[in-house]
């Protein structure tokens, strides 16, 4: 399993690690201590991915026509 600290991971790396953890936990063959450790890491990665997605969403810009000068940039609103 990847031993990198979460802040050093890209979103894709964190998601890959989270998927690996999910797969390992779903097999149900791990000792309790290992399962708890992986679960805790999974929660950490889920929070990291959620924050990355929120940050990306805030940066998304919508280009729309204003009728006169072409395109204008607006902040993305949910």
Image (cartoon, helix red, strand yellow):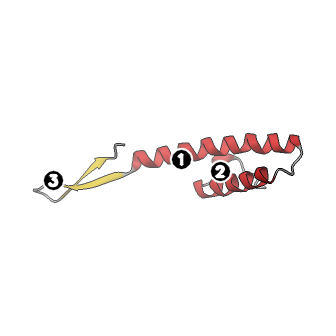
The percent position of residue 74, horizontal first and vertical second, equals: 27, 48
Residue mark closest to the camera, 3 vs 2: 3
Q: Is the N terminus in the top left, top right, bottom left or bottom right quadrant? A: bottom right
Q: Residue furthest left?
A: 68
Determine the CA span between mark 3 and mark 2.
41 Å
Q: Look at discs 1 and 2 and give the one toward the viewer.
A: 1
Q: Residue at x 33, y 52 (%)?
A: 61
Nearest the eye: 17 or 71: 17
Mark 1–mark 2 Cα distance, whole angstroms, equals 12 Å
Q: Residues within 10 Å of mark 2 (few under 14, many from 20)?
A: few
In percent of width and height, residue 28 lies at 82, 50
Disc sitting over residue 52 in the figure: 1
Q: Are marks 1 and 2 in contact (CB under 8 Å)?
A: no
At mark 2, the secondary structure is helix
The residue under the point 80% across, 42% down is 37
Q: Is residue 1 left or right of residue 59?
A: right
- Which of these two is toward me, 67 or 7? 67
Quadrant holding the C terminus: top left
Residue, disc 2: 8
Work out whether mark 1 precedes mark 2 in sequence or the reverse, and give the earlier one.
2
Q: Mark 3 points at which residue?
A: 66
Residue pictured at 81% horizontal, 40% vertical = 36
The single residue placed furthest to the right in the displayed view is: 31
């Amino acid at each position: 399993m990847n031993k990198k600290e979460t802040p050093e991971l890209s979103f894709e790396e964190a998601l890959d690690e989270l998927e690996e953890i999910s797969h390992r936990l779903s097999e149900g063959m791990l000792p309790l201590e290992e399962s708890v450790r992986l679960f805790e890491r999974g929660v950490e990665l889920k929070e990291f991915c959620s924050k990355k997605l929120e940050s990306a969403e805030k940066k998304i810009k919508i280009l729309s026509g204003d009728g006169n000068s072409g395109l204008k940039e607006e902040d993305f609103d949910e």
